[in-house]
Image (cartoon, grey):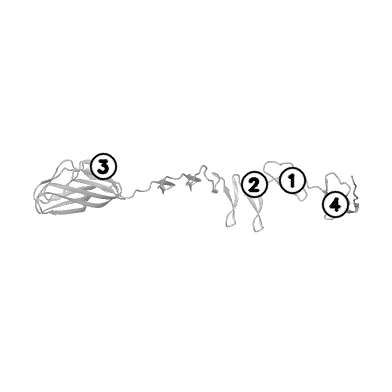
Amino acid sequence: MALHKVDISMLEDIPAPGAAGKVLSSDGTNWVNADAAADLPAVGADGNVLTSDGTNWASEEAAAVDGDSIFPFYKADGNSDNITITSGQFPFYKADGVLDNINTPGGGDGLNVGIPLNSVGGDILYHDGSAYARLPKGTAAQTLAMNSGATAPEWADAASGGATPVLDVYNSANLSCLNGNNTTVAFNTETLDSQNAWNSSTYRYTPSAGSYLFIVSIRWATWGANCAQFIYVYKNGYYSAQSSSNQHSSGTAGMNLVSVENANGTDYFEIRVSQQTGGTIDLQADVNSTYLNVLKVS
């Protein structure tokens, strides 16, 4: 094997070994013996921080005030501030630059930003007065409403469009009516009373609050020529709506009345009729001719 000459003048002098723990480092020109970096201290107690005194590292307890930990913090403007961290809180700088502590879910008197677990798409986050709570998503077509106590949101079924039938009654026996007398129609048979608001003894209807469409139909058993007939809707003992007709031919006669009435929940309604034939005649007992239908419109 051929040997090559080495120009030892190209090698820099290596210093003599130094004390134990020294390392070989370059000062940019020569190799020198230098102290190794200071040893890190043994792991300290829980909550200790690593600090430097300018020469060595030390494990020390964090500063504390009334059990709260304080840490130095440099803000964006270069000024230092101390952050006090209370157990169960996180430091937070608000938009105005003021330091605040944010509570973890369920604790403390400050801002509570705990997010409920098990949330799914469509859920809504609301505050129940002490913490944030989850309102599970509703079903299709439901709308968001406030509960009866005005304390929390809830889902409600959307109101259906149009009118809803709530009452269907008729008289099952002929009703004798004196000439010129306002006679209350005795609708004594129910086929529908969804609010249980019809009194079959007084023949009064006391619906819940809302607006209602009244449809009344009557037919007389006999009739004379050129006689007047009337239908009335009475509300709380006073007539609220009226329909009249003058029948020019003899035989039988009938008529209808349609009226929208507003109820407050205690208002009651009656249907009355009157005729001017000069004598006593009967209203026919017929489910298809003498009846009262009521629909709730709002």
Q: Secondary structure at mark 2?
A: strand
Please say if the residues under marks 3 and 4 sit with CB atoms less than 8 Å apart.
no
| Residue topped by disc 3 | 192
Along the line of sight, which residue is nearer the eye, 286 or 150?
286
Along the line of sight, which residue is nearer the eye, 227 or 66?
227
| Residue topped by disc 2 | 69
Q: Amino acid at mark 3?
A: Leu
Q: How many other residues sit within 10 Å of disc 2, few (<14), some (14-19) or many (≥20)?
A: some
Q: How many other residues sit within 10 Å of disc 3, few (<14), some (14-19) or many (≥20)?
A: some
Does residue 293 appear in the picture of this structure?
Answer: yes
Front position among marks 3 and 1 = 3
Q: Amino acid at mark 4?
A: Trp
Across and down, in percent, residue 62 comes to 68, 46
Q: How many other residues sit within 10 Å of disc 1, few (<14), some (14-19) or many (≥20)?
A: some
Work out whether mark 3 precedes mark 1 in sequence or the reverse, and give the earlier one. 1
| Residue topped by disc 4 | 31
Front position among marks 3 and 4 = 4
Q: Secondary structure at mark 3?
A: strand
| Residue topped by disc 1 | 58
The structure residue drawn at horizontal position 19% and vertical position 51%, both measured from the top left corner, is 256
Work out whether mark 3 precedes mark 4 in sequence or the reverse, and give the earlier one. 4
